[in-house]
Structure formats: C-alpha cells, structure tokens
Amino acid sequence: MVEIEELSEGPRMERIGAHSHIKGLGLDEDGKAKKIADGLVSQIKAREAAGLVVLMAKEGKLSGKAVLLAGPPGTGKTAIAVAMARELGEGVPFIQLSGSEIYSAERKKTEVLMEAMRKAIGVKIRELRNVYEGEVKELDIKTGSSPYNPFVKVPQEAVITLKTTEEEKRIRIGPNVAKQLMEYGVTEGDVIMIDSKDGRVSKVGKSSESFSYDLEAEQVVPRPNGPVLKEKEFVYVLTLDDLDRMVAKRRGEGIFSLFLGAEEKEIDPEARAAVDQQVKEWVEKGRAEMIPGVMFIDDVHLMDIEALSFISRAMESELVPIIVMATNRGITKIRGTEIESPFGMPLDLLDRLVIITTDKYGEEEVKDILKIRAKEEEMNIDNEALALLTKLGAEKSLRYSVQILGIAGAKARSKNKEKVIKKDIEEVATRFSDVREAVNHLKKYEEELLK
C-alpha cells in the first residue's frame, strides 16, 4: 500500500522543468497558430503542421506514419513534441529518449525501443476505489538528489492540501505520487483524485472556484462534494509497460529481483502477449480504453540501420504510439553503413515520414522566449538585462542565453536581490562559454592537450 499520511503542516518548494510551461500548440479554433500562446513562440508553420498531425491522430488516421521534426539546434523541436502530447489530452503518455540511449551492453536495442513504445501507450482503467479527492489548495514538493546521480533533483515527497465543499485535509505523499503530480502539471486550483491504495493520480480539471479567464484552455469542474477520502469510481492510466511488469512478476520472472531489488532486464514476449489479450478483453467489456501517447526520439540520426528498420516495421503494428523523431543534421552517413542520406536516415523510411521543419528564431522571438522562461522561474529581470540576454541569444544561441538566465537568477537569489540586473548577466556571461568560444579555447591550447 502506498504511504499517504494526513498532516497539519508542511514545507513548501517550487518545481520547474525545461518544458513545464508548455500547455499545447497555441492554435485557435481554425487551427491557426498564435504568435505567442501555450508557452510557445513563433514557429507558425511547424505548429500548424503539428496541429494537423494531432487531428489525424485523434481521428485514428496516423497508422503507418511517423513524424520527423527537422531544424537547427534550439528551434523548439522538443517543445513542439511535448505540445503535441498536451494537445492529445490529459494523461496522454509522453516518453522521450535520445537516439544514443538504445545502445547498452545489457539489453538489445530492439528491447529498449519496444519498452519505450509500451511506455508510450496508456490504458485508462475505471474501478471503484477509496480515493482522496478535492481541489488542490496547497502543493509543496520536496526534492533531493537522485540516488543514481547526485546532480539530478528528483521528488522525495510532497505535502498537499485538498478541499471539498465540506472538508479540508492535509496529506503527505511519497515520491511516486509526487512524481505523477509533476508529470501531470498539477497546480493549486486543480481538482484531482489520488488512489489511497496504490497512489495513482487522476487530474479532473480546474476548480470553478479558482478558475481565471486569463488562463488558456482549461476544463472547468465544480469543487467536489462530501469528505476528501471517499469511495468513488477512480479513473487512472497505466501504461502497457506497467502491465507487462505486473504480469512478469506474477509469472515468476525476475524472482531474484524481488529479493535483491534489481529489475529484470527484459520482458518475456509471452508476458506482453498476455497483457495485450487482457487489455483487449477490458476494452471489449467497457472497463478500459486505449490512449496512444507520444514516443519522442531526439537525435534520431544517432540510431543505426538496425534500430531504424525496427522503427519502420513497428509503424505498421496495431499497438503503436505516435512516433515523433527529431534531428538537427543535414546530409550525413546512416550509422552502421557507408551510405550518406538526408538526416542520416534511409530514404525508404524518410518517404513514409511526415516531415515538419523548424526555423531559427529572430531577435524579437528570442526576447519573447526569455520572458516566458523568466516568468516560469518566477524571476524578475530588468529591461537592460533582458536586452543583453536577447543579444546573447541572437549572437550565440537561444540555449546559451536561457542557461545564462538561470545561472544569473541563482546568483541574484544568493545575494538576496529581488531582480536580475544587467551586471549579473555580464558577470555570468564572462564565466561561461558557448560552444564556439569553448572550441576556440581548445584550439588555442591544442598542442598541450592530451591526444
């Protein structure tokens, strides 16, 4: 049983992700992209094209196809992929991996890709459960260093206050539930349900008591009635990979992992077949529905011919997520061959892809993006500092200016300053190099470097 503890008080902590501000593609009712909307800026043609792909996916007409986002670094390819998942609806799985992640001495490339695909396909299940339900009045997430990487912050626990028309209750939840709250973008004013037994989270919508018409597209729902803890039909999403692992454990696979805490490296194909059959029965009985999510493969040019062939074959499968790939390469060799091809991909695969191109941002667009990032990080920045950051973004790269913004914000907070000023940006920029400066520095000392 998941650990949920009712509390009286708790700490407070903000959470920020690289794309936590992305709410959707920012399209109007006619599918036209607004210049700035849903956390996205410009890239009008690419966003409108992505909107048409989402429309095809909702109509179930994307079978046999995949999407390739092609453009220079830092032009919003990942942001567009995230936005596509947001447009598909609440709870839609979004799985991101790099083309280089599939290479492992412990597992086959095809197994890594198959697992990612299964994680990107959700199953919405309905059951009567005891749940905590209410409007989120306070949400405080405590983060700490990952046990596997001390430089990566992960949720450790959270304290959440839920309110109904009759009751208000404060509870402490564990890291798994806290992680779900972050993934679903739960904020104060949202109405959610948390399964008291296994901690599954379902985001219902925005409470009508807290709804602001300044917010963009939100599903408005009334504040729940009755007690916070109640028996109710609980709707939650499991992925096919979650179900695969449950079935594998029941079948006795990975028995040593139950005692030693190690995960089974591969799932037996028979376990996956059993899951597919079970899900099919649930769907036929009306207990569940399928939710194809988005599997986003960044730097797809790093995948070799075998992995690309697997993707090509998987596109024809019945149970397949929406596959979105991204690359910033031009004409280059297909990994594992001596053949040069556009984007480092076989021509027969390229011919089956829906290709969306992205363009470099102009100076005004860089400025708008920096404003959004500053607002997301709750950072006050004066006009001179913003102008300098914009210049750095236009001359060097958007990614560099966003990094400088974050570091300068940390520097200002360490000095108890309420605003980032031009001097903060100048000092940080002199201490951190962009890629070109770093390369020139290495060339300067080329003969003294180790070969």
Image (cartoon, rainbow, N blue to C red):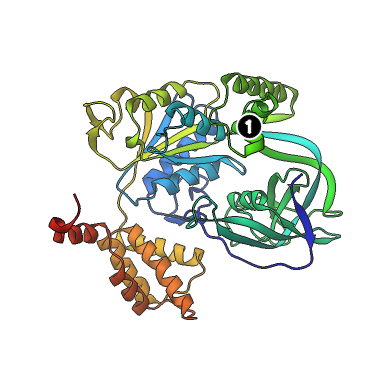
Where residue 423 appears, as percent x and y from the top left, is: 34, 79
Residue at 47% of width from left, 20% of height from top?
316
Q: Mark 1 falls on what kind of element?
A: helix
Residue at 50% of width from left, 81% of height from top?
416
Q: Quadrant of residue 386?
A: bottom left
- The residue lying toward the viewer, choosing from 211 and 386, is 386
Q: Quadrant of residue 277?
A: top right
Determine whether, in the image, residue 311 is placed left or right of residue 275: left
- The residue lying toward the viewer, choosing from 189 and 310, is 310
Residue 69 seen in the figure: yes
Q: Residues within 10 Å of mark 1 (few under 14, many from 20)?
A: few
Where residue 428 appears, as percent x and y from the top left, is: 34, 72
Determine whether, in the image, residue 102 is placed left or right of residue 336: right
Number of marks drawn: 1
Determine whether, in the image, residue 45 is placed left or right of residue 189: left
Where residue 328 appears, as percent x and y from the top left, is: 30, 43
Amino acid tagged 1: Phe
- The residue lying toward the viewer, choosing from 341 and 39, is 341
Where residue 110 appears, as percent x and y from the top left, is: 45, 26
128 shown above or below 275: below
Q: Residue furthest left?
A: 447
Determine whether, in the image, residue 218 is placed left or right of residue 150: right
62 shown above or below 391: above
- For label 1, the residue is 256
254 shown above or below 89: above
